Image (cartoon, rainbow, N blue to C red):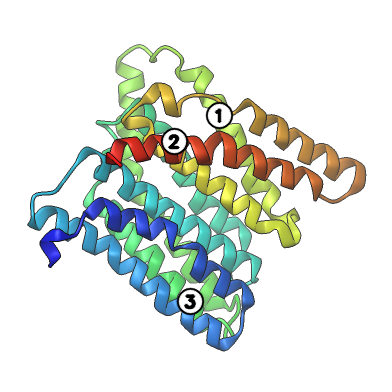
């Protein structure tokens, strides 16, 4: 039975099923919190299962090596930002954790060999998922207690330690060789996800739009290693929508309509195109 499983489909299901536990968390009752924890534990287990199936039955593939880190980034980004919305975690350390994922996504476009996933990075993902489960288990009892505050900063430290080799290897490549053509220009795409993060605390009930936009960003950029020209395309409309959000916040001290515009642009420019591209890679 196990040999019939497609590890890529398992990874894809981890992404597609994630909105369900996130929605249960937002309801924020004891029952839905426990239900979300069970579902998240199952989805976290699939992070081990897809790799085990791929290695055991020799189904390791190029698309699988792309999808797995994408799924991990989407998982951590979604759950941690929901926990921030529920006031179970402070925003700053979570922003630093997600910021690391944004930077690594950018570096992998240009330096795929220097940023290959390492065992320490898998340990980092396990720590991130385990800490999220811990917060959910004790949320009503502690709720940003000193223990949780210490724990999340420990996760930040492990998160950046796991990427130290990525940063050093990429820097060495830039230092000893000429900077790749278009590297500096493409760095401008960091403006978009960083602004999404900074806008999150002001998004109110529409916080989920920021999460969706970030997830689609990771999805598109994660496909860069299979087609750099596809993933490196700038989402000019998304950047303009960010400027619209900043304008609405400045003029009216709130963001609402601009977030809905952002959602539409993100779905069309990043989401739909990425799903179609991935569908082709999977051979469906």
Q: Secondary structure at mark 2?
A: helix
The structure residue drawn at horizontal position 44% and vertical position 36%, both measured from the top left corner, is 221
Q: Position of residue 141 (x, y in %)?
A: 57, 88
Q: Secondary structure at mark 3?
A: helix
Q: Nearer the viewer, mark 1 or mark 3?
A: 3
The disc at residue 120 is none
**First-in-chain label (3 vs 2):** 3
Location of mark 3 (residue): 36
Residue at mark 3 to residue at mark 2: CA–CA distance: 28 Å
**Horizontal placement of 65 versus 243: left or right?**
left
Do residues under tags 1 and 2 come within 8 Å of each other at their CB atoms? yes
Question: On the rendered image, what quadrant is the N terminus found in?
Answer: bottom left
The structure residue drawn at horizontal position 13% and vertical position 65%, both measured from the top left corner, is 2
The 10 Å Cα crowd at callout 3, few under 14, some 14 to 19, many 20 or more, is: many
The disc at residue 189 is 1
**Horizontal placement of 120 versus 272: left or right?**
left
Q: Position of residue 26 (x, y in %)?
A: 62, 72
Location of mark 2 (residue): 221
Residue at mark 1 to residue at mark 2: CA–CA distance: 10 Å
The 10 Å Cα crowd at callout 1, few under 14, some 14 to 19, many 20 or more, is: some
**First-in-chain label (1 vs 3):** 3
Question: On the rendered image, what quadrant is the C terminus found in?
Answer: top left
């Amino acid at each position: 039975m196990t040999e019939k499983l497609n590890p890529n489909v398992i990874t894809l299901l981890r992404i597609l099923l994630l909105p369900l536990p996130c929605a249960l968390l937002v309801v924020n009752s004891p029952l839905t919190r426990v239900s979300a924890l069970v579902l998240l534990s199952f989805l976290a287990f699939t992070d081990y299962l897809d790799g085990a199936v791929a290695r055991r039955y020799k189904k390791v593939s190029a698309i699988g090596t792309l999808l797995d880190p994408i799924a991990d980034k989407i998982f951590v980004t979604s759950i941690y930002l929901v926990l921030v919305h529920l006031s179970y975690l402070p925003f700053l350390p979570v922003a630093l954790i997600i910021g690391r994922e944004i930077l690594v996504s950018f570096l992998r476009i240009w330096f795929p060999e220097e940023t290959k996933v390492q065992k320490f990075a898998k340990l980092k993902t396990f720590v991130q998922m385990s800490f999220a489960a811990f917060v959910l288990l004790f949320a009503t009892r502690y709720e940003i207690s000193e223990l949780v505050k210490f724990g999340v900063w420990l996760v930040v430290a492990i998160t950046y330690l796991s990427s130290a080799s990525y940063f050093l290897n990429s820097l060495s490549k830039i230092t000893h060789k000429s900077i790749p053509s278009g590297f500096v220009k493409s760095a401008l795409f960091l403006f978009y996800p960083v602004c999404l993060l900074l806008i999150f605390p002001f998004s109110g009930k529409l916080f989920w739009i920021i999460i969706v936009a970030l997830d689609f960003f990771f999805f598109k950029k994660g496909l860069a290693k299979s087609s750099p020209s596809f993933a490196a395309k700038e989402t000019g409309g998304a950047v303009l929508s960010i400027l619209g959000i900043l304008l609405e916040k400045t003029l009216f001290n709130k963001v609402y309509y601009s977030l809905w515009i952002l959602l539409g642009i993100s779905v069309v420019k990043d989401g739909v195109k990425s799903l179609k591209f991935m569908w082709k890679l999977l051979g469906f």
